[in-house]
Each structure stands twice: as C-alpha cells, then as structure tokens.
Amino acid sequence: MAAPPAPSIATDRKGAAAANHGHGRRHVLLFPFPYQGHIHPMFRLAGVLHRRGFAITVFHTHFNAPDPALHPDYRFVPVPDGMSCPPPVTIEDTFAQIISVGDACEAAFRDRLAAVLQEYSRDAVACLVADAHLLPVFKVATRLAVPTLALRTSSAACHACFLAYPMLCKKGYLPVQDSQLDLPVTELPPYRVRDLLHIGEAGHHLECQLVARAVAGVNISSGGSLEFDLF
C-alpha cells in the first residue's frame, strides 16, 4: 500500500514556532526506535546536541509516539507506520515487531524526509541519527544523500557479540544448547555460552535476522555507531 501524501511541514502554530526557532542553525534529524529503552537515550542525545547549538527535528512512528509537549524546543514529524497488530506476547513476537517497524514506515519516511530537506535545505542538515534497528531508514537517507549515524542503546560489548554472530553460529555456539551453557566462548572472552543473545531454537531465525539488520544499519551509516547508554 502506498504511503499517504506527506503533510505540509510546520503549518500549525507550534510547528511553525519550532521551525522558526531553528532558523539559521544546523539541524540534526533524529529517528528513535519506538520502544522506551531506545527513545530515552535518543532524547538524552538530543538534549546534548541542542545544548551545543543544533536545532532538533524528531521523526517518530505513530506507534508509541513521544509527547511533543515534553520537548517544546524540538520539531516533531510523525511517520505513518501501519502498525495495527496486537502488542507482542512472546519474545519471538517482540523480535518480529522490531524487524517489521522499519519496513512498515519506509515509504512514508522517504516522503517526510524529502519534505524536510526541501524546507531546511540540505546544507542546513548536519546528519540523521537513527536507531541501528531501523535499517530501511538508513537506506532511505543514503538514497537522499543525507549523512547518517547509527545509535545503539546497548553496550559496545553487545555490538561486538552482534558482529561475531555469524562466527558463533558457524562454530556451533548458536543456537544455544542447554548442555553447553557453561562452556566458554573462547573467541569472545570472558563470555560463556549462557551469556550470548538467544531466544531458543524456534526463534533462532528471527534472532539471526534482527542481529544482521542491526549490524547492517551500523555498516551502512556514514560514520559508524554511537553507543549511548541510558544509565
């Protein structure tokens, strides 16, 4: 289904005020993944950037949308996501939803980003910072020649494990077998098998897809990733 047409940007009083507030400043565009553990670090980063003089524009899905009233100095651009499925029940459901969110909003984000670039001008946009799990967002930005950075809200050690995932599967550490839980992962000390990301053999294909997409999001970005822990 084609995405609805992009609305005119900053037509209401709050939107116009936010846009005018950023006049003459470099803009950083942000797109958080719509889970709270990902939204909070993104907004902490937004605060750091705003204090350093950048104007902030936040793209967001309708699913679990942030409240613009809590951040009156930022510009908010909603992106239709078509997420009408029931909330996840199992960990497999959660992984499937994480994978599907970026795909669901790709076409609409392309229209919204193009409209923002037309309004701000490309020279005024410093970069787009998007959650590493939103691989289609990076692909859209790359096609529109917008520099990107991937935000990872977990640790650098976790990302190292993600990078090693194909090797871990090839060497038989994954999918995890109960009889091997206490075995050391000699290629990733001090990990033991029980420390690896795993959701069971039934969900292993989802796990591989999620990890591969997160790594691809970092690799396709212009400058690698930012590790920004909430705590």
Image (tube, grey):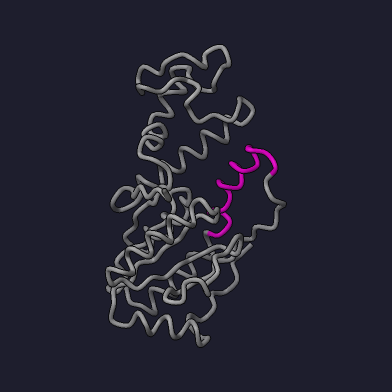
Residue at left offset 34%, top offset 54%: 149
Q: Quadrant of residue 188?
A: top left
Q: Is residue 127 magenta?
A: no
1 left or right of 54 in image: right
- The N terminus appears in which quarter of the rendering? bottom right
Residue 99: x and y, percent? 55, 46
From the image, give the main secondary structure of the stretch colored magenta. helix
Residue 145 appears in the figure:
no
**132 and 184: which is toward the camera:** 184
**93 and 205: which is toward the camera:** 93
Residue 17: x and y, percent? 44, 85
Q: Is residue 127 above or below residue 131?
A: below
Q: Is residue 103 above or below residue 170?
A: below
Name the outermost residue toward the front.
Answer: 231
Residue at left offset 55%, top offset 53%: 35
Residue at left offset 54%, top offset 65%: 66
Q: Quadrant of residue 118?
A: bottom left
Name the outermost residue toward the bottom.
Answer: 13
Q: Is residue 6 above or below residue 139?
A: below
Q: Which residues are magenta?
A: 89-105
Q: Is residue 99 magenta?
A: yes
Name the outermost residue toward the top.
Answer: 179
Task: Say how many tags the image has.
Answer: 0
Residue 219: x and y, percent? 35, 45
165 left or right of 181 in image: left
